[in-house]
Image (cartoon, rainbow, N blue to C red):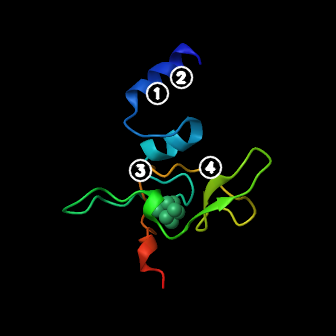
Amino acid sequence: MSAIAKRNAADSPHPGRGSARIHFDRGRHPATRLPLLEPGAQGEPPVCGGCAFLYERAGSHGARLKCRVRASKRRPGPNLQPGFPACQRFQPANDQA
Ligand code: SF4
């Protein structure tokens, strides 16, 4: 990692690396490109790990977490982490019947 990349990583309050962090720093989610969901008045801020749209996609290097609400219809989108901050399409996973 270059000195500039290390400094940028240390300056950012957001998770992820590379382009994912760039989107978070701009207030948008890297998967959907939608604005991040504002934290609620109480409780923990929502994260992708609690969202109904998160799913596991098999790949040659193992399963990866992806979002069904992706920005591109032709690409599966970036790999997500359960702790990524949620976007405005967040839907609690336990809302599914
Ligand atoms: S909060 Fe849900 S809809 Fe938004 S990026 Fe995460 S998994 Fe996708």
Location of mark 1 (residue) = 9
Indicate the secondary structure of the residue bearing disc 2: helix
Give left or right: position of 59 versus 77: right
Graded by Cα atoms within 10 Å as few (under 14), some (14 to 19) or many (20 or more), the crowding at tag 3 reads some
**Image disc number at residue 5:** 2
Residue 34 in sight in this render: no
Taking the spot 40% from the left edge, 33% from the top edge, the residue there is: 12
Location of mark 4 (residue) = 79
How far is disc 4 from disc 3 in space, using C-alphas?
18 Å
Indicate the secondary structure of the residue bearing disc 1: helix
Name which of mark 2 and mark 4 comes first in the sequence.
Answer: 2
How far is disc 2 from disc 1 in space, using C-alphas?
6 Å
How far is disc 2 from disc 3 in space, using C-alphas?
20 Å
Where residue 14 appears, x then y in whole percent? 41, 40
Q: Is residue 63 above or below residue 15?
A: below
Report whether the residue tagged 1 is closer than 8 Å to ligand 1.
no
Give left or right: position of 54 versus 37: right
Taking the spot 59% from the left edge, 19% from the top edge, the residue there is: 1
How far is disc 1 from disc 4 in space, using C-alphas?
18 Å
Report whether the residue tagged 4 is closer than 8 Å to ligand 1.
no
**Image disc number at residue 27:** 3
Name which of mark 2 and mark 3 comes first in the sequence.
Answer: 2
Residue 1 in sight in this render: yes
Q: Nearer the viewer, mark 4 or mark 3?
A: 4
